[in-house]
Image (cartoon, grey):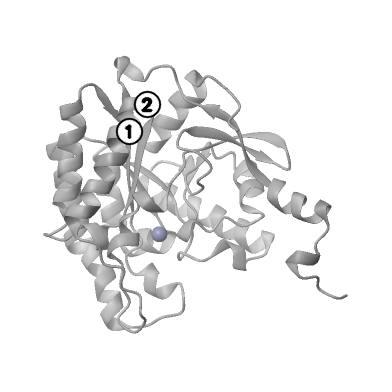
Amino acid sequence: MQTLEPWQWSEEQWRKIVGHVRAGRRLRPRKWPDDAHCAIALSFDSDHETNELRDGGKSIGRLSWGQYGNRVAIPRILRLLRQHDVRASFYVPAVTALLYPEEQQGVAADGHEIGIHGWIHELNSALSYEAERDLMLRSADVLEKISGTRPIGMRTPSWDFSPHTLRIAREMQLEYDSSLMADEDCYELLLDGEPTGVIELPVEWVRDDAVYFWMNRFQSHRPYTAPSDVFDIFRRELDAAYAEGGVFQLTLHPHIIGYRSRIWIVEEIIRHARSLGNVWFATHAQVVRWAKQEGSGATGT
Ligand SMILES: [Zn+2]
């Protein structure tokens, strides 16, 4: 059969593609717990060595970058969060959890959430439904066995959400995903127009440290932004979320943000948030559950 180019697609075809996974009800609560003005949801994607392994890479240098995430960055991040009494969410590929079970146990013992982040940080859109489902289920099993709690949420590796991901999440009775970007508030995900009960806590590249700091020695991939500029962007996002009574969500990576010259960004964000007034630091799971229960249900357009 001849493959049609996108400009040859019928209206039915492109509408079907666009309509497959969509944002439904917007869930902005009238208020947050204890009358807080704003929810602050910090997350750390503990990719570590899987960033190298997932493409079949075996570079000892880049694997050591991953080990830094475990040896230096995670302890530094946990210390900081403890010092400021903040709970966050950690999204952990199963291979990271198997390499570092004690790290996950420490994260869980500090009251943080652990969510699914693929098996080896694979790209979901490269997989069949059966393969993606098998990896998601095995990943949930590994995280449950190691941390003692079955994850209720996921973040697709590289935010690569396949045409099957939502169906699998619903089959697994996951409560939420955090890897799409149709809104700044939580919303219910629709599958082919039908509400699924799965809630999205949206992410955005502007609120992701990797965009500003990530580099690859052998590619022209060096989008360097000064840490003070990154702080400025995050702070403006936070100020606006506070003014609107919404959610401020951040995606950070231990082996990117955990350096001496960058970790202060997280600390200053926490300090700045507290200086604004009454804010609610919460895990993604807590934010999603509150939004689902208290959200106004207005349809976002
Ligand atoms: Zn990741």
Residue under the point 15% across and 42% down: 268
The quarter of the picture showing ligand 1:
bottom left
Measured in 3D between alpha carbons, the distance from the residue under mark 1 to the one under mark 2, in whole angstroms, is: 6 Å
In the image: residue 229, left or right of residue 122: left
- As shown in the figure, which amino acid type bears the numbered disc 1? Ala
Is residue 36 positioned above or below 8 on the image?
above
Q: Residues within 10 Å of mark 1 (few under 14, many from 20)?
A: some
Q: Give the position of the N terminus as an image quadrant.
A: bottom right
Where residue 177 sits: x, y (%)? 51, 43
Q: Who is closer to the viewer here, 224 or 144?
A: 224
Q: Give the position of the C terminus as an image quadrant.
A: top right
Where residue 225 sits: x, y (%)? 24, 62
Find out whether the residues at labels 1 and 2 contact each other: C-beta distance under 8 Å.
Answer: yes
Spot the residue most to the front: 7
In the image: residue 193, left or right of residue 122: right
In the image: residue 98, left or right of residue 193: left
On residue 240, which mark appears? 1
Mark 2 — residue? 244
Label 1 beta carbon within 8 A of ligand 1: no
